[in-house]
Image (cartoon, helix red, strand yellow):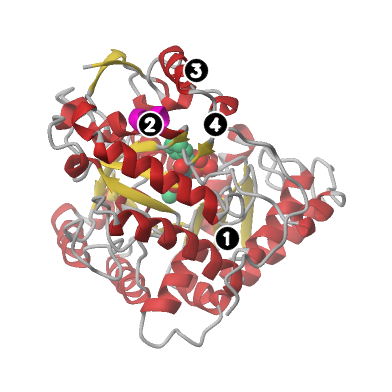
Amino acid sequence: MPKGEPFKIKMVEPIRLIPREDRERALKEAHYNPFFLRSSDVYIDLLTDSGTGAMSQFQWSAMMLGDESYAGASSYYRLKETVTDITGYEYVIPTHQGRGAEKVAFSQLITRPGMYVLSNMFFDTTRGHVQLAGGRPVDLLIDVPTEEYHPFKGNMDTERLEQFIREHGAENIACIVMTVTNNSAGGQPVSMANIRETYQIARKYGVLVLFDVARYAENCHFIRMREEGYADKHPIDIAREMFSYGDGLMMSAKKDALVNIGGLLAFRDEELFTKVGAAVVPFEGFLTYGGLAGRDLEAMAVGLREALDPDYLAYRVGQVQYLGEMLRNAGIPIQWPVGGHAVFIDAAKFLPHVPWDQFPGHALTLALYLEGGVRTVEVGSLMIGRDPETGENVRGPFEFTRLAIPRRVYTNLHLEDVAETVINAFQKREEIRGVKFAREPKVLRHFTAWFDPA
Ligand SMILES: CC1=C(O)/C(=C\N=C(/Cc2ccccc2)C(=O)O)C(COP(=O)(O)O)=CN1
C-alpha cells in the first residue's frame, strides 16, 4: 500500500508563519477570538473542515457545465440523480449550506413551541435552529469517558431514547436527528447497528428520523473498518443501507460533498418533501437551486461520489489518525480513539488550572495560535452557551479544543508542524490563562464574542 496521497498537486496557494510579535498584535485586534483573525495571518488553518477542502479537477471541469436557469436546471437533475443513487431518497432540494437546510426543516417540523427534537448530539448551529424554531433540543449521546476506548462513541443511547419517547409522548416530539459522524462528540462515528436500532424505535412510536449527514462518508468508512460484516462492502453500499434507516436528511455539503458552499435536504416520501419544501422558496430560493448557482450543484454532484472513494477515505481519515497518534505519543490529552475529521484536545486536562467558565478550550486556541500560527476552535462550554431559562452558563460534558483537518489541503509535514506547536504549548501550559467576555452575543456567541484574558 503506497504511503503517498491518492492525488498529485496541480495548483498551490502560498502560506507562511508571520513573526510572533505580529501574531500577538493580530490576536489583540481579533478581540482574542480566532474567528476574527485574517486568514493571511494564519499559518495552518484548522478552524474548520467545513468548506475549506480542495476540489478535484473533475469538480472544477464539471462547473463549466453549470446550467444557471432559474428553474429546472440540468445541473439540478444531475445532482438529484446522484443523491437518489446514494440515499434512495427521491425528493431532493439544494440549500445554500447546512444551516439553510436546518432552518427550512425545523420551521416546518416544529409545529408548536416547546416540541422536543432528540439527537445523539446536535451540532451547535443545528441546536440553534431547533431553538430558533421554538423547539427543545435533547442530546441522548451514550456516556463513554473521553479516554476510554469505544469504536462508536457517537452512538445514540437508545435506552434513554425509548424512555424519553414513552415519558413525553411521540406527539410532542418533532423528529429525531441522527448526526453522523457526531461532530460535537468529537467527530465520533455511529454504528450501523445503532442507526438501525434507533430507526426501529422511531418506527415503533411513529417518530420521524432525519439524518444530519455532514460527514456521512467518513461514518461509512468507520463502519467498514470497525463493524462486523462490513469490511468487504464499498462505502456507497454502506451508505445505501444507512439511509434505509431514516426518513430524510439534512446535509452541510461543505464537508463530505467536498465543496466550498452548499447544503441539501432529501426525503423518502412526497408528503414530507411537500411539508418541508413549503419553506424553501421563501428562505432559500426555488426548489431546484436553493440559494446556489448551477455550477455549485455540478461540483456537489461530483464531490458526493468522490467522498465515497475508499482510497480517498483511507487517506483522509488516516491523516487525522496520524496527527492524533503524534499527540498521544507525546502525552497530550486527546479524545481517543480519534474521530474522522479532527483531533479533539481535552483542554480541561491540558489546562487543569483554568476553571470551566473561563473556557479552557478557547484559552488553548489562543495559545496554539501564538505558539505556531495554528488556528483551531473551542468545542465545549463556550459553544454550548447559556441556559435559556436561567441565563446561567451551561457546563458542557467536555472542554475540547478541536483541530479540524481540511480535506485534500495539508500534507503530513504541515501536521508535524501542528504537533510541534501543540507540544511546545503543552510545555508552557502553566503560563496559559483563561478568558472572560468583553462582549457576549445572545445566540451562537462563540462565533462573534469578544474576550479579554481572565
Ligand atoms: C454536523 C454538522 C456540522 O458540523 C455543521 C457545521 N459545522 C461546522 C461549521 C462551523 C461551525 C462553527 C464554527 C466553525 C465552523 C464545523 O466546523 O464543524 C452543520 C451546519 O452546516 P453549515 O456550516 O454548512 O451551515 C450542521 N451539522
Which tag is nearer the camera, tag 4 or tag 1? 4
Query: In the rendered structure, does residue 325 fall within the stretch colored magenta?
Result: no
Residue 36: x and y, percent?
48, 21
Range covered by the magenta-colored residues: 366-371
Mark whose residue sits in front, 4 or 2: 4
Instruction: Measure how far apart labels 3 and 2 are at the Cα level.
Output: 39 Å
The response on whether ligand 1 sits within 8 Å of label 2 is: no
Tell me which label, 4 or 1, sits earlier in the chain. Answer: 4
Identify residue type, mark 2.
Leu
Mark 4 crowd level (few <14, some 14–19, many ≥20, 10 Å Cα): some
Residue at (41% x, 56% y) in the render: 323
Residue nearer the viewer, 216 or 148: 148
Name the kind of residue labelled 3 in the image.
Asp
- The spot of residue 218 in percent (x, y) is 48, 64
Residue 28 in view of the camera: yes
Q: Give the residue displayed 34% in from the left and 47% down from the top.
A: 122
| Residue on which the image places disc 1 | 270
Q: Secondary structure at mark 1?
A: helix
- Residue at image location 57% in from the left, 53% down from the top: 411
Instruction: Mark 1: give few (<14), some (14-19) or many (20+) Cα within 10 Å.
Output: few
Q: Give the residue pinned by disc 4.
A: 17
